[in-house]
Amino acid sequence: MNSLRKHLLALGLLLSLGASAHAQSSDKTGYVNAANVNMRSSPSVQSKVVGKLQKGDAVLVLKRSQTNSDRIEAILLKDAKFYSQEGEYRFTLPKGKAVVLLAFDPDADVYHVSYVNAGLRGHAKLDRSSVKTITNELWYYVQTLKSKQRAWVLARYIDLGEDIEEDSIVVYEED
């Protein structure tokens, strides 16, 4: 009987610890602070966009990661319009679009970048003030509270509650 009681107490303790851990995970709720935030398949602006978040959307932060890339990634700070050599309008890469910085020309104050638009890869020169580098930035692996979709989002677009302990978030490391 005493042995059964000990087992029941141990089971109760384990269940209460599990409930406590579950309650702590809900403390990792964050809120999207921008419109049309890309959800990506991996922590890189070059990975596939798998969804969108809107300002105010609630997400659960599951993991975090630093960008580990040999490439210098950036996002456009303003729309970039492209024209043919004859001056004919071709397309616009919108603000927030991901690009890869290939080189910087200090004489012209421009970056040489590569991009993907409608599935086609291209190269362009963009004024330095039109891009923001994001290499080695923090990413969150999140789950939306509404649809339960999971994907990677740049941490700058997620505001966490004040009571979040960074140590409580699991760090994701790729091999």
Image: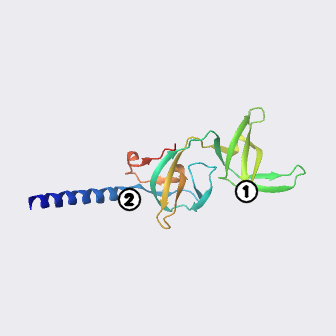
Image coordinates of residue 28 in percent, x first then y, are 41, 55
Amino acid type, mark 1: Gly
Figure quadrant of residue 52: bottom right
Secondary structure beneath label 1: loop
Report the residue at 59% width, 61% height from top: 51
Q: Residue furthest bottom?
A: 146
Which residue carries the number 1 mark?
A: 119
63 left or right of 68 in image? left
Report the residue at 17% width, 58% height from top: 7
Image coordinates of residue 56 in percent, x first then y, are 51, 62
Secondary structure beneath label 2: helix
Image coordinates of residue 156 in percent, x first then y, are 53, 49
Task: For marks 2 and 1, give the one nearer the viewer.
Answer: 1
**Label 2 Cα crowd, 10 Å radius (few <14 / some 14-19 / many 20+):** few
Image coordinates of residue 75 in percent, x first then y, are 65, 48
Q: CA distance from mark 2 to mark 1?
A: 38 Å
Amino acid type, mark 2: Ser
Quadrant for the N terminus, please. Answer: bottom left
Q: Earlier in the sequence, mark 2 or mark 1?
A: 2
Report the residue at 48% width, 48% height from top: 64
Which residue carries the number 2 mark?
A: 26
Q: Residue furthest top?
A: 107
Viewer-closest of 99 and 82? 99
Viewer-closest of 14 and 107? 14
